[in-house]
Amino acid sequence: MSPSDTDPAYPTDRNVVEPDCERCPALAEHRECISWGTGPLDASVLVIGEAPGPGTPDAERWRGGNWTGKAYTSRHSGRRIRRMLERVGYGDDAYYTNAVKCFPADPEDPTSNREPTPAERTNCRGHLLTEIETVDPDVVLATGKHATASVLAAEDRTLEGFIDTVLEPVDCERLETTLLPILHPSYQDVWIGRLGYEPEEYLAAIGEALEESCGPGSE
């Protein structure tokens, strides 16, 4: 079995910020579990996704945050991003969360997800800021456009053209950390080539960018 085929370590606990949060009635109505962050509270890297997907309730283990109550524990995206961080040397030094903690069900098809509304993002931003303040990471690794926009919103900044920001570090003065946008694991196979990378080159570039921000003398 190649390293890319092995399962990363599965999280055993979660960081509950507000039990039974019901700030967003539509989200509270359709979720199974609130998908809280997982990982060490002194991690160097804080990984942010957009929101948990519908998940797979009959999966043996990697059901997804909507069913596990833990961020980035889906069979596809969760395993993939955790494996990526493991391969670049941060498998034990990363905390995983989402900008929105609850599965945003599509009202026309509750088994699929919609984009969180601006109000839902705002309601959940306090949880995200609490996590960033608690973990105090060297780098916030935002996976995808919406996660990147959520971090920038906390800085009173807007995102203009996500693809141009990939692997371009952003100094966040208010959050006192560095934002590093990367492709969401669900879409990276489509976009890596368009960015001019081979898969191994892209992974190496992420590792190099993290090392520059997390290594000695980076503060």
Image (cartoon, grey):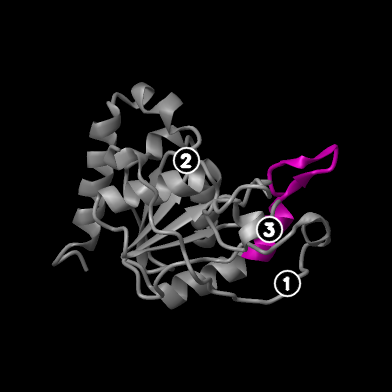
Q: Is residue 74 left or right of residue 123?
A: left
Residue type at the position of mark 1:
Cys
Per the model, the C-alpha gap separating discs 1 and 3 is: 10 Å
State the residue position of label 1.
21
Q: Position of residue 113 (x, y in %)?
A: 71, 42
Residue type at the position of mark 2:
His
Looking at the rendered structure, the secondary structure element under dot 3 is: loop
Per the model, the C-alpha gap separating discs 2 and 3 is: 18 Å
What residue is rendered at 30% in x and 53% in y?
86
Q: Position of residue 174 (x, y in %)?
A: 43, 68
User: Residue 171 is drawn in which quadrant?
Assistant: bottom left
What residue is rendered at 51% in x and 72% in y?
13
* Image quarter in which the N terminus is found: top left
Q: Position of residue 92 (x, y in %)?
A: 31, 64
Name the foreground residue: 71 vs 170.
Answer: 71
Tell me which numbered mark, 2 or 3, is placed earlier along the sequence: 3
Name the foreground residue: 75 vs 192.
Answer: 75
* Tag 1 and tag 3, C-beta contact below 8 Å: yes
State the residue position of label 3.
102
Q: Is residue 88 left or right of residue 194?
A: left
Q: Specify the farthest residue to the left.
A: 216
Tell me which numbered mark, 1 or 3, is placed earlier along the sequence: 1
Task: Verify whether residue 27 appears in magenta.
Answer: no
Name the foreground residue: 178 vs 27.
Answer: 27
State the residue position of label 2.
184
Looking at the rendered structure, the secondary structure element under dot 1 is: loop
Q: Residues within 10 Å of mark 2 (few under 14, many from 20)?
A: many
Per the model, the C-alpha gap separating discs 1 and 2 is: 26 Å
Residues in magenta?
104-124
Looking at the rendered structure, the secondary structure element under dot 2 is: loop
